[in-house]
Amino acid sequence: MGDVDNRRGGRAHNRRDEILRVALETFAERGYRGTSLAVVAERIGLTQQGVLHYFPTKQALLVEVLKLRDAEDYQRFDGGSDEPHLDGMRHLMEYNATRPGVVQSFTVLSAESVTDAHPAREYFIARYRVAREHHVAGLREELGERLAAGLTPEQASALLVAVMDGLQLQWLLDPDQVDLVDLVDAFARLLREGATPAVPAVAGAVADA
Amino acid sequence: MGDVDNRRGGRAHNRRDEILRVALETFAERGYRGTSLAVVAERIGLTQQGVLHYFPTKQALLVEVLKLRDAEDYQRFDGGSDEPHLDGMRHLMEYNATRPGVVQSFTVLSAESVTDAHPAREYFIARYRVAREHHVAGLREELGERLAAGLTPEQASALLVAVMDGLQLQWLLDPDQVDLVDLVDAFARLLREGATPAVPAVAGAVADA
DNA sequence: GTCTATATGGCGATAGAC
DNA sequence: GTCTATCGCCATATAGAC
């Protein structure tokens, strides 16, 4: 992430950034394989060849788009806060509920990335590993070593990631039937109930499985 | 599901079924948009036009493929058993862990379906509604009306679907790091712990949210 | 039932003018 | 920095021969 050269003095709003923004939007709407460089270009008022002036290939454009999205999200939800980890995840879902386009891009691209020779495959493998480690640390800090139902922080972490991804898919398909925030909150209660700090007196009775 | 005419006396192994099977395989590997009729055809030893003899359009082929997968799964996991609902889900995950290709097809196509004007979009909306209703009934039967942490069967149902989808995505990307069966089992323990039948004596102390 | 031939159009990428 | 022109390829779908 330190190697993104923000050319020519660091100004933010140039053509290159515009292309990245519109490409993210378009990949969200149509997937990577379903998106042509021409439609990205057209939305900006450029030709396909104009886009290829900034990125050598379509594949390179995708990789830069993903880097950008990560950079923005980490800036917003990683540095800042002292709140409990699961509260942070509820706030992330509250934020995501306001930007279906970005959620869609992530949902579509991550699933598409499991297909053969997809250019973002390695990227998503690494991203999920980092995410799980991040949640392990956050959950351990909030809830200790033994969680509800005898879960380890590692298990809870993979489940938390799965819940957020899975809920987002259901929400994208059927927003009126699926309440993102309510459900992630319900899952958080599930993890908290019975965790070591919550009910120490009866922990032995329920935790050993 | 009653309207699939299994032409000419019900024999199973004809060209049409062969095309459906190979198409499912190929959509799994490359997505719907990334798959051409020609590669499906070539794998069977047919030309693209030979495939279009059996299905009028590529879109129609996709729809038939999805119908087929549902029919097979319902046959296997819906009719049969008297076991608790969550045990059935663990068995489904055990089965899925042996057939990554099918899991991949479902993961890829469901996420791709949220993109603009995707031919399977309505199909997946309906499928998720049915799945959630199905789990509501199964969870209510197994665990009663009040689950751990005061969750309703409706909330638990959406979470269960999300967990299974989300875990499958992580598993497809990183099978050595993600244990499908262990994790779905961990989630089942989470739902069971504190449910009405499990700890009736202290239910009032934790259930009201 | 499967083929060849073909219409029609979109794709990513390169070369080079201005 | 953006364009026009073009290459080579692949896509879905139709028409019609065998």
Image (cartoon, coloured by chain):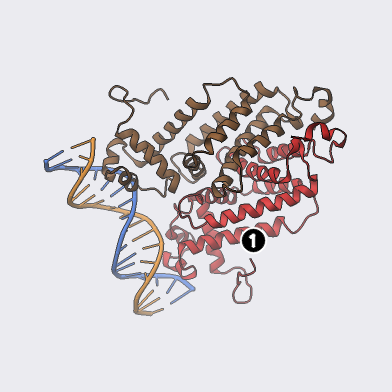
Chain colours: A brown, B red, C blue, D orange
Count neighbours of disc 1 (C-alpha within 10 A) and say few if under 14, some if 14 to 19, many if 20 or more: few
Residue at the spot 60% in from the left edge and 42% down from the top edge? A167
Residue B160 location in percent, x, y? 68, 44
Depth check: A157 or A8 in front?
A8
Residue A176 visible in the snapshot: yes
- Quadrant where the C terminus of chain A sits is top right
Residue identified by numbered label 1: B71
Residue A60 visible in the snapshot: no
Residue B106 location in percent, x, y? 57, 51
Residue at the spot 46% in from the left edge and 62% down from the top edge? B58
Residue at the spot 51% in from the left edge and 52% down from the top edge? B113
Residue B15 location in percent, x, y? 53, 68
Q: How many labels does the image show?
A: 1
Q: In this view, does B1 lie above or below B189?
A: below
Q: Residue B17 occupies which quadrant of the picture?
A: bottom right
- Looking at this view, name the residue that lies furthest to the front: B209
Left or right: where B187 falls relative to B82:
left
Disc 1: which chain? B
Depth check: A87 or A2 in front?
A87
Q: What residue type is labelled 1?
A: Ala
Describe the element under mark 1 as helix, strand or loop: helix
